[in-house]
Image (spheres, grey):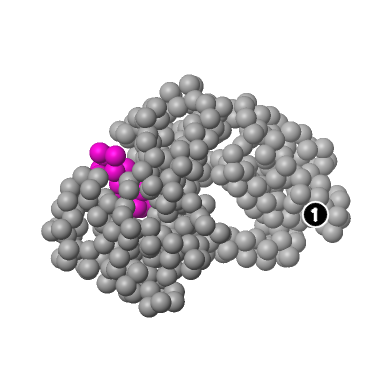
């Protein structure tokens, strides 16, 4: 460690303007190199990750893209910290921590051709702050080192937390057992989608015990999420699934559709379950990431109708668990009869199966004008679904 600090001390004899020039050059590169397009990581990086971790091509490309973007934006914070090495730490620290995210966002804005959307802003700000703290650590700021450790730990816990208690998990298992026990009464197609809602929330209402309706609603959504969303939902929840029931689950999954499509039913309930396990933002992040991965070779393509199903599921989870009044209102609505249009709108005119090139060139990527128009259109359609609206 001492040797590293000595090496840095020797390098610190370089004039500050040298590091400032390097920062400017790096920012220019971030502005003009088109790599940060959605899932635009270099093939050699993707291949390296696939070889090292035996992951699929879409997953490796997604991870590689995030890592490359994050490291590139973080370097702005490192270079800015070092370029201000002659400024006392007490003055440099706040200046760097405030300026680095602004520089990162500006580079993203110029590169993308539009102001970064929320998810892109998150990546830019977090990466720049991490880079700034690393740069301040190189100046022997132990406070920066401690802050960096806390930040990274917090991000890890935030990203991996599920927010589901043992009680909810146990009740979700009980709800799933109830649904599987009544699987013979569940028809195929959209009628099966409605019947699942009816059975799950009927069971939830019967177990509300006149007081808490939020808890059994969470269990109902998690149960359907596991039944229709494969074992991945159970893995996210860190709750093992009974492998002896997998054939029953698969049989039910194949029968259920939403507006005639099996994949939309699964999108809907997986997103709803993920919203229960984490939060609304992360649920939508997963949905968008899934669609971006589908734009890679071998994927089904970016689909706005899939995103509509993701968003609808997330909204249902919000309504069903926001508070006791909304939870009970949903139970009452379901008891009076399930109408599919109250839970999911029509999808006519929503593009699907878009390749990465088409999505980027014709729709402008995630922040493109046409993408934002379609996203607004989806929200307007969902706003007409009565079951997805909160009452207070």
Q: Nearer the viewer, residue 17 or 194?
A: 194
Can you give x and y, in whole percent of width and height, for residue 273 in the image? Answer: 38, 58
Callout 1 environment at 10 Å: few (<14), some (14 to 19), or many (20+)? few
Residue at point 35%, 69% (across, down): 205
Magenta region, residue range? 257-271
Left or right of residue 190: residue 379: right
Tell me the residue at 74%/33% (across/down).
Answer: 24
Does residue 161 show up?
no
- In this view, 302 is above or below 344: above
Where residue 237 sits, quadrant-wise, is: bottom left
Quarter of the image for the N terminus: give it: bottom right
Q: Nearer the viewer, residue 171 or 200?
A: 200
Residue topped by disc 1: 94
Name the quadrant of the C terminus.
bottom right
Q: Compared with residue 308, is residue 114 higher up or lower down, i.e. above or below? A: above
Please state if 32 lies on the left or on the right of 89 as rendered. Answer: left
């Amino acid at each position: 460690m001492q040797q590293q600090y000595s090496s840095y001390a020797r390098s610190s004899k370089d004039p500050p303007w040298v590091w400032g020039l390097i920062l400017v050059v790096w920012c220019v590169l971030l502005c003009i190199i088109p790599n940060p397009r959605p899932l635009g990581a270099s093939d050699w990086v993707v291949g390296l990750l696939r070889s090292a971790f035996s992951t699929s091509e879409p997953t490796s490309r997604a991870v590689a893209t995030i890592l490359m973007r994050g490291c590139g934006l973080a370097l702005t914070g490192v270079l800015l910290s070092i370029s201000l090495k002659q400024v006392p730490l007490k003055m440099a620290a706040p200046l760097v921590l405030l300026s680095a995210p602004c520089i990162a966002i500006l580079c993203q804005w110029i590169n993308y051709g539009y102001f970064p959307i929320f998810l892109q802003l998150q990546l830019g700000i977090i990466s720049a702050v991490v880079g700034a703290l690393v740069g301040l650590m190189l100046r022997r700021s132990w406070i920066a080192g401690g802050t960096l450790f806390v930040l990274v730990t917090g991000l890890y816990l935030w990203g991996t937390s599920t927010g589901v208690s043992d009680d909810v998990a146990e009740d979700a298992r009980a709800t799933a057992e109830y649904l599987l026990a009544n699987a013979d009464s569940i028809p195929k197609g959209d009628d099966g989608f409605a019947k699942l809602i009816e059975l799950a929330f009927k069971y939830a209402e019967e177990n509300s015990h006149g007081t808490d309706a939020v808890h059994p609603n969470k269990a109902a959504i998690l149960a359907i999420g596991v039944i229709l969303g494969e074992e991945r939902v159970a893995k996210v929840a860190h709750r093992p699934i009974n492998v002896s029931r997998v054939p029953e689950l698969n049989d039910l999954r194949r029968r259920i559709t939403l507006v005639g499509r099996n994949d939309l039913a699964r999108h809907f309930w997986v997103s709803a379950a993920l919203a229960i396990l984490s939060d609304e933002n992360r649920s939508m992040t997963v949905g968008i990431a899934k669609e971006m991965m589908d734009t890679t070779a071998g994927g089904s393509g970016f689909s706005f109708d899939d995103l509509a199903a993701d968003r609808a599921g997330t909204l249902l989870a919000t309504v069903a668990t926001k508070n006791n009044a909304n939870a009970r209102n949903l139970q009452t609505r379901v008891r009076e009869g399930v109408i599919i249009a109250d839970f999911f709108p029509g999808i006519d005119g929503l593009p699907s199966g878009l390749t990465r090139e088409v999505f980027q060139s014709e729709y402008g990527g995630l922040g493109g004008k046409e993408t934002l128009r379609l996203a607004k259109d989806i929200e307007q359609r969902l706003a007409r679904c009565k079951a997805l609206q909160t009452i207070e």
